[in-house]
């Protein structure tokens, strides 16, 4: 798939505030500072589409981007909200949960995991919740350029084994780098195949 157009379509805190035009939605989520905005910008070829920040927890709204006038890429707030008050954390958790569990247009959720570290308890708890609620998801290991290929492969395999302790079957998994563009073609091809099978 080639992305020829990517435009901001609106922000909301409730699914009732989503864009009026109903199209398939592919959402991206991960813990704070996992590189979500950078990945979205890399996939769309637009470095200014999603706001990147060195401050974790910058995304606090559901942001819809219209892609190729045919589907939405959805940028969700991160979980594991760093440096936020308890009430703000609770509100973000509500926003995320309502969207994931009650958005009829959601086709697939991409869960982003930092490839430099063992998959964390917060990620495992989030993924377990997706499974219990029947939410289709895939995993993208981000920041794949930050260590050598052998170390990267070993870390991804370690995370696979951690997941296999709970899951009989693993979801699709991808490795990406916003810096080098690694993973772009295979992730977009996967989205294209999912769209073709809807």
Image (cartoon, rainbow, N blue to C red):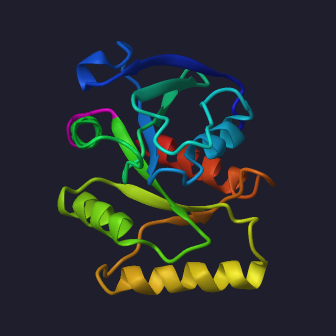
Residue drawn at the location 45% of the way across and 27% of the way down: 63
Residue 93 drawn in magenta:
no
Q: Quadrant of the N terminus?
A: top right
Q: Is residue 37 above or below residue 4?
A: below
Q: Quadrant of residue 102?
A: top left
Residues drawn in magenta: 101-105
**Residue 180 higher or lower than 24, as above or below:** below
Residue drawn at the location 70% of the way across and 27% of the way down: 48
Horizontally, is 103 left or right of 66 in the view? left
Pick whichever, 64 or 51, lies toward us: 51
**Nearer to me, 70 or 41:** 41
In screen coordinates, is 134 left or right of 148?
A: left
Tell which of 10 and 108 is nearer to you: 10
Q: How many marks?
A: 0
Q: Where's the C terminus, which quadrant?
A: top left
Q: In the picture, residue 97 is in which quadrant?
A: top left
Q: Main secondary structure of the magenta part?
A: loop
């Amino acid at each position: 798939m080639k992305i020829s157009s990517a435009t901001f379509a609106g922000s909301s805190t409730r699914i009732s505030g989503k864009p009026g035009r109903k199209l398939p939605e592919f959402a991206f989520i991960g813990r704070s500072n996992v590189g979500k905005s950078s990945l979205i910008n890399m996939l769309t070829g637009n470095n200014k589409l999603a706001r990147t920040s060195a401050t974790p927890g910058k995304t606090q709204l559901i942001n819809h981007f219209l892609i190729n006038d045919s589907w939405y890429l959805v940028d969700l707030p991160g979980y594991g909200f760093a440096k936020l008050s308890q009430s703000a954390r609770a509100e973000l958790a509500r926003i995320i949960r309502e969207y994931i569990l009650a958005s009829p247009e959601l086709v697939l959720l991409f869960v982003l995991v930092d490839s430099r570290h063992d998959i964390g308890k917060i990620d495992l708890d989030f993924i377990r919740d997706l499974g219990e609620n029947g939410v289709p998801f895939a995993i993208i290991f981000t920041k794949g350029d930050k260590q050598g290929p052998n170390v990267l492969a070993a870390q991804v395999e370690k995370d696979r084994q951690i997941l296999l302790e709970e899951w009989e079957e693993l979801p699709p998994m991808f490795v990406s780098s916003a810096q080098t563009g690694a993973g772009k073609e295979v992730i977009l091809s996967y989205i294209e195949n999912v769209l073709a099978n809807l």
